[in-house]
Image: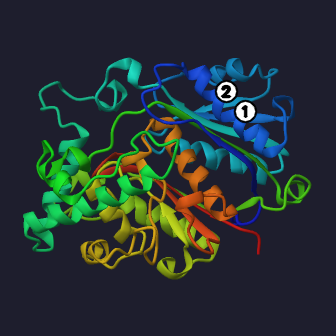
Amino acid sequence: MGGIRDKVAIIGMGCTKFGERWDAGPEDLLVEACYEALGDASLESKDIQAAWLGTYVTAFTGQLLAEALKLDYIPITRVENACATATDAFRNACFGIASGAYDIVMVAGVEKLKDTGWTGLGNNAILPNAGTQPAVPPPAQFALAATRYFHHYGIDPDKGRETLAKIAVKNHHNGSLHPKAHFQKEITIEQALRAPMIAWPLGLYDCCGVSDGAAAAIITTPEIAKNFRDDYILVKGLGLAVGGRQGTLRDDFDFVHFPETLSAAKQAYEDAGITNPRKQISMAEVHDCFTITEMIIMEDLGFSGRGGGPEDVDAGTYTLEGELPVNTDGGLKCFGHPIGASGIRMMYEVYKQLQGKAGPRQVKDATLGLVHNLGGIPGSFSVGVGILGTRD
């Protein structure tokens, strides 16, 4: 089976400022992100042959993108896969290029959540049931994962909460360095630990917020990319894994690892020829919807050993100055999480890092970056993993 390695190149990317975008509708956000991407690639909308739009609740067809950019009857496919929507949309667009069906395509993600008044995911996240089971919102679901993790590895809860606070402090620091991030304020460990409790042991600073925003990419073949720029970025590997609620149905599921991440990462690593991710990957953007999620993901991706996440967090391994910087733009926690846009926003950061254009967040000698996007609940996720790299 052939892989995607070096068959697709990114020649342009764009991203709006994330946050409470009361000043803009979804069409405005798409125009902002897509025209930055088009300008970055030195293209016009008429040059786009097909497009993929990722959105969770903001639109129900690809017509939103067609209307925003006044695209002239080209194929546009709307993709939805919970919080993994954007990486799945990107994956589909890459296949459109790698198959030879198109030369130049666009992939965009957008979400306008603040106008809904929701404090988290909307009604689409509610699975069909008999109406008798209690509501268990995402903070409670991941709080259960945190308490189970502490119990499984014999971690004192107070010490565990302090380790999670260090993840929040790191991501707030990184977000403070990015002008497009939703939250641009540094915090201390003490502030994180004393913040209002959302679902024990997760406090306010352990949880990502609700954001508006959009991001976009222009992709083509490496052969065509050479005509546009020297610093185009190559897709090295892609993986997607979707659970079938196995974890919620099994009484032996441990809830301290996410099998879908293991499977998606294995696919992407094999595609990209990665055998030692901690040493080979320069930086990563992962789905830190909650601080405990980031720590578990570090182990599932092979960056930390099983149960070794807390030690690496405490050692500063994943800070900007550490061995393997993670969420260099602040992650979901601080850059924001407009669901349909998040995965492409992650790629936007990796793209800039690999080009050496990340400013004060720049990782030294970055050549290979990872994107991890996760949607669903512990025990049943959709997970996308992408590996981007510079030219050999």
Residue 189 location (% of width, % of height): 21, 59
| Residue in the image at 15% along x and 66% along y | 160
* Total labels drawn: 2
Q: Position of residue 147 (x, y in %)?
A: 13, 58
Coordinates of residue 62 in the picture (x, y in percent): 64, 25
Helix, strand or loop under label 2 = helix
- Residue 77 sits above or below residue 13 on the image: above
Image quadrant where residue 271 sits: bottom right
Whether label 1 touches label 2, CB < 8 Å: yes
284 or 61: which is nearer to us? Answer: 284
Position of residue 151 relative to residue 275, above or below, is above
Q: Which residue is mark 1?
A: 35
Please report the residue visible at 29 percent of the width from the left and 56 percent of the height from the top. 168
Residue situated in front as seen by the camera: 153 or 203: 203
What is the three-letter code of the residue carrying label 2? Val
Q: Nearer the viewer, residue 48 or 114?
A: 114
Q: Is residue 163 left or right of residue 238?
A: left
Q: Is residue 166 visible?
A: yes
Q: CA distance from mark 1 to mark 2?
A: 6 Å
Residue shown at 22%/36% (left/top)? 137
Q: Which residue is mark 2?
A: 31
Which numbered circle lies on residue 107?
A: none
Along the horizontal axis of the image, is 282 left or right of 124? right
Mark 1 residue crowding within 10 angstroms, few (<14) / some (14–19) / many (20+): many
Looking at the picture, how far across and down is residue 251, in whole percent? 15, 58
Residue at the image point whose x is 89% and y is 54% from the top? 224
80 relative to 201, above or below: above
View extreme (right): residue: 227
What secondary structure is found at the residue carrying circle 1? Answer: helix
At label 1, the amino acid type is: Tyr
- Residue 87 to residue 391: above or below: above
Q: Is residue 27 toward the left or the right of residue 209 in the image? A: right
